[in-house]
Image (cartoon, rainbow, N blue to C red):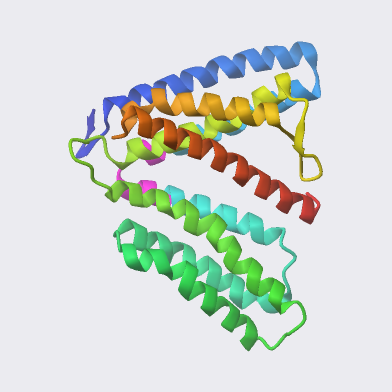
Amino acid sequence: MKIGTHYIPLEVLYTLAVVFGVLIICSTVFAIYHHKAKSTFSKELVVRTKSWWYISLGVSLVVAGPLLPATLVLAYVSFVALREMFSIGYFRESDRAGLFLAYIAVPVQYYLAYHNHYEQFLYFIPAFMFVGIPFILVTAGQIPKIVRSMSLIPSTLILTVYMISHMVLLYHVEFPDYELGGGSLILFLIIVTSFNDVFQFTWGKLFGKHKIMPLISPNKTWEGLIGGIICTTLLAYFMRFLTPLNPMESLIVGFVLALGGYIGGALMSAIKRDLGI
């Protein structure tokens, strides 16, 4: 479908329609269930569904819009994530200059991604910011706990800005005989990753008995992990029409995304436990 000069693939529109259809059904069912059951589990279902509404609306802006609005939305997500991590990081007063430099890195990183300055994109945060931020912290002249700040600020940049900004690069990727564009690739990535969380949560709640890391992530079980990986791998196989992947490649990508999703969740759980959240 064409809106102005921007073309939205029908595959993207159909997929988004299915996603919102599923959300409508889930919201209705979970609201009725929570009204009758009033349990912690039912409340968690309602809260998670509301979160998926916000995520789905944001994803729609990214995958169905032109490159510039999509880049701005992703940059905003990085900014919010960076601000959230900094707000719970217990930084020193003398770290303000380093924190400010980290915020400046957000528009710079996304500018490089938007214009596909690939080499500069790759080394700006891992090299320049990993040197620049510690140097700024040193110039403040406050030594106590400086090593913690030197480590935490650049690492937070990697987690919240560098990793997310890679999605913008998908708009610049070209494959032979593939015309759906970067929005379709991002839609595939987000759907598979998001449903991996849903699958692991559902399998864990229904069948989970054997905890993997009870002190770090008490809700994660082997049953949830294995069931989530299987379902996510199959989902990637059936969603491959959004990508240039062949059947085997889609299965491999689905498996990697499922495993990576679990690893990322475990890392964030460890951070939350350490910060007492």
Q: Which residue is drawn at 43% across and 19% down?
A: 18
Q: Position of residue 87 (x, y in %)?
A: 69, 59
Q: Which of 258 and 191 is in front in this view?
A: 258
**Span colored in magenta:** 61-72
Q: Nearer the viewer, residue 132 or 97?
A: 132
Image-based side of 177 in relation to 158, left or right: left
The quadrant holding residue 236 is: top left
Q: Which residue is drawn at 49% across and 54% down?
A: 163
Q: Nearer the viewer, residue 206 or 59?
A: 206
Q: Position of residue 100 (x, y in %)?
A: 57, 71
Q: Is residue 251 visible?
A: yes
Q: Which residue is drawn at 42% across and 63% down?
A: 109
The quadrant holding residue 101 is: bottom right
Q: Which of 267 and 153 is in front in this view?
A: 267
Image-based side of 164 in relation to 153, left or right: left
Considering the whole magenta stretch, tell me its main secondary structure: helix
Q: Position of residue 51 (x, y in %)?
A: 60, 33
Image-based side of 2 in relation to 254, left or right: left
Outermost front residue:
248
Q: Residue at x 38, y 64 (%)?
A: 121
> Total marks drawn?
0
Q: Please say if 234 is above or below 193.
A: above
Asked if the magenta segment contains residue 62, the reply would be yes
Q: Where is residue 142 in the image (x, y as percent from the top left)?
A: 72, 85
The quadrant holding residue 237 is: top left
Q: Please say if 199 is above or below 92.
A: above
Looking at the rendering, in which quadrant would you find the N terminus? top left
Q: Can residue 65 be seen in this view?
A: no
Image-based side of 55 in relation to 18, left or right: right
Asked if the magenta segment contains residue 206, the reply would be no
